[in-house]
Image (cartoon, rainbow, N blue to C red):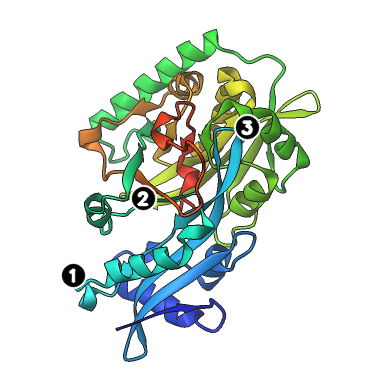
């Protein structure tokens, strides 16, 4: 077995082939060529692609990107470990571990920390490795959508939950109507988002920066996903941003609230954004709307105001975990466990 670093250019088809080999039963997880270039192309974030080869064929893949993360008052380089996979015929033979060790020894010095979102196949390894630790366990919030026709083959529990959540939402929204906030969908990034981030960043001590570079790449430039992007305005100033999309997951047509951030963690601004996005998602025929969030209590209240309920852990379709470890760039006094003002959404994982 040979471990080598390769460029994306000239190796795209071979990389896509291992996706096809590993995810033959779940083709929605196989990226297009355009999406592969968006994630691994090195713009705006530098990427490294390590592969394991056997007889010239790629049997394992370990890509990583050099992103940014805010820790306390500073912004530092961070290694995001991306899609790791091993060909089914070579699983259980140490390929994953060998790739991980090689990539880490080569690039740890490029980041203050590393983070990743393990899937159901790789999570066992991260739990075994002592250097890696659980940074966040993201809860899932779901809002069921009322059936469009009573004759639809919906279970009674869905009917009850959806109408119950609608009543809950109506009552809460009567008490929490935002003032002087308008919400609109936008099709290209605006500089006001950068200004909003600059005003908001001091509210958090652990967050992936939502600056204009990141928002533009993440939600406006992805070729195969059409995100529905919204801003809240107070006068001429942007006071909130939200990104949503549709996707078939867990066998149902879902609307996803992928990301958001708002001025001063304002409950009413987020409520206004959620209402607008949910209305548009329902028009597109989704059966339910989901979001993931860890953060300030005022924002959690806004989520509940809009009819979302926290799914009990035992009912989750799978775990949604974020693992981390310290990198080779030393930051004096850095202790990730000490940070209390964290902010995480589904969008932190750029596969969503």
Q: Position of residue 272 (x, y in %)?
A: 60, 24
**Which of the pair 299/75 is nearer the observer?**
75
Extreme residue in the front direction: 332
**Mark closest to the chain's N terminus, 1 or 3:** 1
Q: Rounded to the nearest whole Å, what is the CA distance between mark 3 and mark 2?
A: 32 Å
Q: Which of the two labelled residues, at mark 3 and mark 2, occupies the earlier sequence position?
A: 3
Residue at left offset 63%, top offset 46%: 215
The mark lying in front, picked from 3 and 2, is: 3
Q: Which residue is at 39% across, 40% downward?
A: 287
Compared across the picture, whether 40 is left or right of 326 comes to right
- Residue holding disc 2: 249
Q: Secondary structure at mark 2?
A: strand
Q: Secondary structure at mark 3?
A: helix
Residue 320 appearing in the image:
no
For disc 3, the marked residue is 201
Q: How far is mark 1 from mark 3, CA to CA? A: 43 Å
Distance, label 1 to label 2, CA atoms, is: 28 Å
Q: How far across and down, in percent of the image, does residue 114 sit?
A: 44, 51
Please identify the quarter of the rendering in which residue 153 is found: top left
The N terminus, quarter of image: bottom left
Dividing the picture into quadrants, the one containing residue 154 is top left
- Residue 292, given in percent of the width and then of the height, sits at 42, 36
Residue at x-position 46% and y-position 28% = 295
Residue 92 badge: 1
Please identify the residue farthest to the bottom as the structure is shown: 55
Residue 33, disc: none
Q: Is residue 254 left or right of residue 220?
A: left
Q: Earlier in the sequence, mark 1 or mark 2?
A: 1
Near-viewer residue (229 or 6):
6
Indicate the secondary structure of the residue bearing disc 1: loop
Report which quarter residue 313 is drawn in: top left
């Amino acid at each position: 077995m040979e471990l080598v670093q390769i460029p994306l250019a000239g190796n795209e088809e071979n990389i896509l082939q291992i996706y096809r080999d590993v995810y033959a039963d779940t083709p929605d997880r196989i990226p297009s060529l355009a999406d592969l270039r968006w994630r691994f192309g090195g713009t705006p974030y530098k990427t490294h692609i390590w592969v394991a080869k056997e007889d010239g064929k790629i049997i394992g893949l370990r890509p990583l990107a050099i992103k940014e993360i805010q820790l306390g008052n500073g912004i530092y380089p961070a290694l995001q470990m991306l899609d790791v996979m091993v060909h089914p015929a070579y699983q259980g033979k140490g390929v994953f571990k060998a790739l991980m060790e090689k990539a880490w020894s080569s690039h740890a010095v490029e980041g203050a920390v590393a983070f990743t979102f393990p899937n159901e196949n790789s999570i066992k390894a991260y739990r075994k490795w002592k250097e890696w630790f659980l940074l966040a366990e993201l809860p899932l919030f779901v809002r069921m959508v009322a059936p469009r026709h009573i004759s639809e083959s919906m279970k009674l529990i869905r009917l009850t939950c959806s109408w119950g959540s609608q009543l809950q939402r109506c009552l809460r929204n009567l008490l929490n109507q935002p003032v002087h906030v308008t919400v609109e969908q936008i099709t290209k990034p605006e500089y006001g988002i950068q200004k909003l981030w600059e005003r908001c960043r001091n509210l958090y001590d652990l967050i992936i920066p939502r600056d204009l570079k990141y928002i533009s790449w993440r939600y406006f430039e992805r070729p195969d996903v059409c995100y529905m992007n919204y801003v809240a305005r107070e006068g001429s100033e942007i006071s909130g941003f939200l990104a949503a999309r549709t996707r078939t997951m867990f066998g149902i047509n879902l609307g996803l609230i992928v990301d958001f951030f708002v001025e001063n963690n304002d409950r009413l601004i987020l409520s206004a954004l959620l209402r607008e996005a949910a209305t548009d998602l329902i028009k597109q025929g989704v059966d339910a709307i989901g979001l993931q969030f860890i953060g300030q209590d005022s924002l959690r209240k806004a989520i509940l105001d809009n009819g979302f309920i926290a799914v009990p852990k035992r009912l989750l379709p799978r775990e949604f975990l974020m693992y981390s470890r310290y990198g080779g760039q030393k930051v004096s006094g850095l202790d990730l466990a000490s940070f209390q003002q964290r902010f995480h959404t589904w969008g932190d994982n750029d596969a969503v």
